[in-house]
Image (spheres, rainbow, N blue to C red):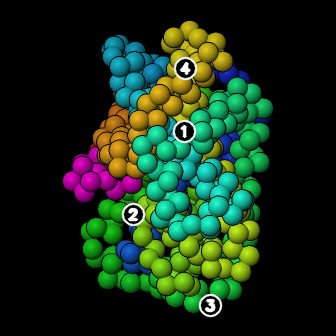
């Protein structure tokens, strides 16, 4: 049954993914981002080492099985992004207001994209510095300060936005699918190469001990569970928007629960590989494995400067991060672009110009790092989590279990796992709301 045959649904206007692997790589590309690289390794070591993996894996399994799959199914059912999908759900109950509610996660995606484009611009400039040697010709703090001042990185910022727009201009198949099928395997390969090289550094074992020796007492600390939940929730990119739009481009023949499981597994592997590449290298040179931008842009350049063949590995490192950042940015832009096409009735290229222009016009004023930090805190603590919990409630309470389960079973032979209804409608939606509250209380947990 096509989306046009579903009452209230829409025909996807930008095509469909041609293959399951293309869809999965695109979804993994959306999920894998800076948090996997600068946040996960630090939290793994700080909150119990290998013991942290127990709550983390549990939350990834839960959020992947009912959160990720729910968003994919919601998008495929409605054939559109959050505004149209939320409107569809509300109309199924004879209610209005879905478009207004759908705008919240849409603006969340745009807000993240605005800040993310700035950060990926830093990555691109650091990659250029690694290639030319300029990254090592001066102190890492000085190089970082030079690109994070007010209006300090405009050419690289523009280049990143243009890169994302050019990819999207080629459409779903030639743009999103093709690029992710190249960039995401390359990301894993490059990080594996770096991880193998790091393993032979003197002192690397201290880093592995930091990551892997379990501190079982950490499991008795509620903060460990809070951080594991936040890391899992945001790492899978369950925002009530991005995965809905990718789901809208998915064929009815595809098994959504299976694709969701593979996406969650690959996203987790990306975080683990990043940890094994980054933290042992930091410990090998006695540096601080602090989380956030300083780990990538200050600490690791110091590591590469002291490594044999460090310039080569710096190039590989920043290239892999560029791939991860670009694929995430493409997803965020696509959510907003599809909405501009459908609801503002713009053609593809004008819609992309509007999205890219808006991202730059707002982002250029937050290139100064303290401003960027405040912007990203506001978006990730308030807008995105609220949009995500609205999305969870919209899928499992407003649209309802019968409709979403029917879509989940389309293209699938095996029944859903026992307890799906309870976990989805009650536990998942409750935890999504808890993420909002805890994010406010702790000043961010993602």
- Closer to the camera, 323 or 108? 323
Name the chief secondary structure element in magenta: helix
Residue 55 image offset from top left, x and y in percent: 41, 67
Q: Is mark 2 on a helix, strand or loop?
A: helix
**Disc on the earlier residue, 3 or 1:** 1
Residue 286 image offset from top left, x and y in percent: 49, 84
Q: Is mark 3 on a helix, strand or loop?
A: loop
Where does label 1 land, which residue?
154
Q: Nearer the viewer, mark 1 or mark 2?
A: 1
Query: Marks 3 and 4: in contact by CB < 8 Å?
Result: no
Where residue 92 sits, quadrant-wise, is top left
Q: In this view, does 58 lie to the left or right of 266?
A: left
Which of the numbered marks, if any, corresponds to residue 202? 3
Distance (Cα) linking label 4 and label 1: 18 Å
Q: In this view, does 173 lie above or below 119?
A: above
Sort mark 4 into few (<14), some (14-19) or many (20+) by Cα contacts within 10 Å.
some
Q: Nearer the viewer, mark 3 or mark 1?
A: 1
Sort mark 3 into few (<14), some (14-19) or many (20+) by Cα contacts within 10 Å.
few
Residue 88 image offset from top left, x and y in percent: 45, 19
Q: Which of marks 4 and 2 is in front?
A: 4
Residue at screen point 49% across, 44% down: 152
Distance (Cα) linking label 1 and label 2: 35 Å
Stretch of the chain drawn in magenta: 435-446
Where does label 4 land, which residue?
354
Residue at screen point 69% across, 63% down: 133
**Disc on the earlier residue, 4 or 2:** 2
Q: Is mark 4 on a helix, strand or loop?
A: helix
**Disc on the earlier residue, 2 or 3:** 3
Distance (Cα) linking label 2 and label 3: 30 Å
Q: In which quarter of the image is the C terminus?
A: bottom left
Where does label 2 land, which residue?
228
Q: In this view, does 400 lie above or below 218?
A: above
């Amino acid at each position: 049954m096509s989306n046009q045959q579903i009452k209230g649904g829409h025909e996807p206007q930008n095509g469909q993914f041609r293959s399951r692997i293309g869809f999965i790589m695109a979804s993994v590309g959306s999920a894998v981002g800076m948090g996997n690289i600068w946040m996960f390794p630090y939290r793994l070591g700080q909150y119990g080492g290998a013991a942290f993996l127990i709550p983390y894996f549990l939350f990834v399994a839960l959020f992947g099985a009912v959160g990720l799959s729910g968003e994919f199914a919601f998008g495929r059912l409605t054939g559109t992004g959050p505004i149209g999908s939320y409107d569809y759900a509300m109309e199924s109950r004879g209610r209005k207001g879905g478009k207004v509610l759908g705008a919240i996660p849409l603006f969340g995606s745009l807000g993240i994209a605005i800040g993310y484009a700035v950060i990926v611009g830093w990555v691109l400039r650091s990659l250029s510095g690694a290639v030319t040697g300029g990254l090592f010709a001066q102190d890492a703090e000085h190089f970082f300060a030079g690109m994070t001042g007010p209006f300090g990185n405009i050419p690289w910022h523009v280049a990143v936005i243009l890169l994302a727009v050019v990819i999207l201009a080629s459409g779903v198949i030639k743009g999103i699918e093709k690029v992710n099928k190249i960039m995401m395997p390359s990301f894993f390969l490059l990080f594996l190469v770096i991880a193998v090289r790091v393993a032979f550094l003197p002192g690397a074992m201290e880093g592995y001990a930091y990551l892997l020796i379990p501190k079982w007492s950490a499991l008795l600390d509620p903060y460990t569970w809070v951080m594991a939940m936040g890391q899992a929730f945001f790492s899978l990119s369950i925002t009530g928007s991005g995965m809905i739009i990718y789901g809208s481009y998915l064929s009815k023949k595809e098994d959504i629960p299976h694709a969701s499981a593979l996406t969650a597994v690959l996203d987790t592997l990306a975080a683990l590989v990043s940890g094994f590449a980054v933290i042992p290298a930091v410990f090998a040179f006695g540096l601080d494995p602090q989380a956030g931008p300083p780990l990538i842009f200050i600490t690791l350049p110091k590591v590469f400067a002291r490594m044999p063949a460090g310039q080569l590995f710096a190039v590989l490192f920043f290239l892999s991060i560029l791939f991860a950042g670009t694929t995430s940015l493409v997803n965020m832009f696509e959510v907003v672009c599809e909405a501009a096409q459908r609801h503002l009735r713009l053609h593809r290229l004008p819609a992309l110009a509007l999205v890219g222009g808006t991202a730059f016009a707002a982002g250029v004023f937050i290139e100064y790092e303290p401003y960027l930090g405040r912007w990203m805190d506001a978006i990730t603590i308030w807008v995105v989590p609220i949009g995500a919990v609205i999305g969870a409630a919209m899928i499992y309470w407003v649209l309802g279990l019968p409709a979403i389960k029917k879509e989940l079973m389309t293209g699938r032979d095996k029944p859903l796992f026992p307890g799906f209804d309870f976990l989805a409608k009650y536990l998942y939606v409750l935890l999504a709301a808890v993420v909002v509250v805890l994010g406010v209380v702790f000043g961010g947990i993602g």
